[in-house]
Image: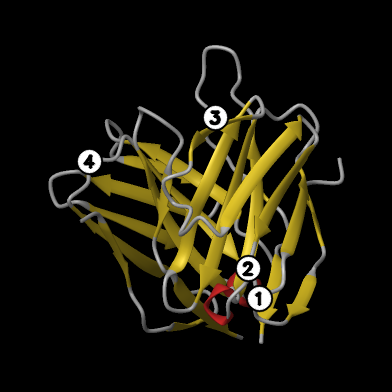
Amino acid sequence: DAGVIQSPRHEVTEMGQEVTLRCKPISGHDYLFWYRQTMMRGLELLIYFNNNVPIDDSGMPEDRFSAKMPNASFSTLKIQPSEPRDSAVYFCASSLRSSGLLAYEQYFGPGTRLTVT
Amino acid sequence: SQKIEQNSEALNIQEGKTATLTCNYTNYSPAYLQWYRQDPGRGPVFLLLIRENEKEKRKERLKVTFDTTLKQSLFHITASQPADSATYLCALRNTGGFKTIFGAGTRLFVKA
């Protein structure tokens, strides 16, 4: 398995521009998570989906952030308009809830390093 | 508010020694506590999970303890190797959902 795939790996954009980050979870996984990591705040959960449905988006910082999961193999995180304080590494992770068990492990992608100038 | 504290200072140890990392939490009653490893430029990798009703869990050279009274977990790496050098993250989760809270991590350096 290729693992969780994220694109792009690096993104540099100017303030005010729209940014779209993409994620392909591990095939068969039914949970998908979006995290943001900065030196100041560490790793923060932004939103997670179960079977393509958003379950908890309480970590989404502002209305400028939105996430979608149109199907089981694809999710996007969009920032519009972007601001310098959005600069961070954004991770996507996926997990599988086995029958009768809770999903414990989250498998993380390599991350997208976003720089907003 | 919920808070997880891990040693902010890097831990430097000699190869072959046991590394011990600490995770303390407040205002939280986690059902599960996890440890992840993160290498520079990479995403975290799951290592171990321990439940609230478990005191200790082992996996090869790794050992995790969980004291819900002290609200603390200790993560041990025995016979440490330079390849163990990385940042180790503590993470907490409740039973009600999959929202996981991560600590800031502790950087471990193992010298040959």
Q: Residue at x 78, y 73 (%)?
A: A10
The amino acid sitting under disc 3 is Ala
Lateral position of residue B104 relative to residue A50, left or right: left
In the shown orientation, is residue A26 left or right of residue B27? right
Residue located farthest toward the top when viewing the structure as drawn:
A100
On the image, the x and y values in percent for residue A51 come to 65, 24
Q: Residues within 10 Å of mark 4 (few under 14, many from 20)?
A: some
Q: Which residue is mark 4?
A: B29
Q: Secondary structure at mark 1?
A: loop
Mark 1: give few (<14), some (14-19) or many (20+) Cα within 10 Å.
some
Which color scheme did the rendering employ for the protein?
secondary structure
Single out the residue that lies furthest toward the left: B69
Residue B109 shown left or right of residue B106 in the figure: right
The answer, for residue A77, to whether it is visible in the render is: yes
Measured in 3D between alpha carbons, the distance from the residue under mark 4 to the one under mark 2, in whole angstroms, is: 37 Å
- Where residue A84 sits, quadrant-wise, is bottom right
Instruction: Give the CA separation, mark 4 to mark 1.
Output: 40 Å
In this rendering, the label closer to the viewer, 1 or 3:
1
Question: Residues at marks 3 and 2, common chain?
Answer: yes
User: Which chain is indicated by disc 1?
Assistant: A
Compare residues A75 and B1 and report the one nearer the observer. A75
Q: Is residue A44 above or below residue B18?
A: above
Kindly report the distance in space between the C-alpha atoms of the residues bearing marks 1 and 3: 38 Å
Could you tell me which chain the residue with mark 4 belongs to? B
Label 2 sits on residue: A81
Location of residue A76 in the rendering, given as x and y in whole percent from the top left corner: 72, 48
- Look at the numbered discs 2 and 1 and tell me whether their residues touch, using CB distance below 8 Å: yes
Marks 2 & 1 on one chain: yes
Which amino acid, by three-letter code, is at mark 4?
Answer: Ser
Q: Report the residue marked by disc 3.
A: A103
Quarter of the view holding residue A31: top right
Name the residue that disc number 1 marks.
Answer: A16
